[in-house]
Image (cartoon, rainbow, N blue to C red):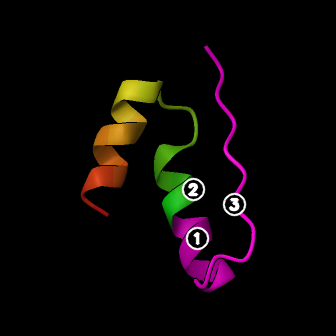
Amino acid sequence: MEARAIAKYVRMSPTKVGVVLDLIRGKNIQEAFAILQYT
């Protein structure tokens, strides 16, 4: 299953967002949600 999320006007630096994306990229949705809860 593939999911896509789009967020505009988020007040975070692109570098920090890239680090979080690298953490969840390639994971299934349940794993990604678990990681995002604690980041």
Q: Which residue is mark 1?
A: 17
Does the CB distance between marks 3 and 1 fall below 8 Å? no
Q: Secondary structure at mark 3?
A: loop
Q: Is residue 30 above or below residue 13?
A: above
What amino acid is found at the position of numbered circle 1 in the picture? Val
Q: Position of residue 29 (x, y in %)?
A: 46, 27
Q: Secondary structure at mark 2?
A: helix
Q: Position of residue 17 (x, y in %)?
A: 58, 70
Mark 1 crowd level (few <14, some 14–19, many ≥20, 10 Å Cα): few
* Quadrant including the C terminus: bottom left
Does the CB distance between marks 2 and 1 fall below 8 Å? yes
Residue visible at 49% across and 62% down in the picture: 20
Which region is colored magenta? Answer: 1-19
Mark 3 crowd level (few <14, some 14–19, many ≥20, 10 Å Cα): few
Q: Is residue 14 above or below residue 8?
A: below
Image side of residue 9 versus residue 38, left or right: right
Q: Which residue is mark 2?
A: 21
Q: Is residue 2 above or below residue 10?
A: above
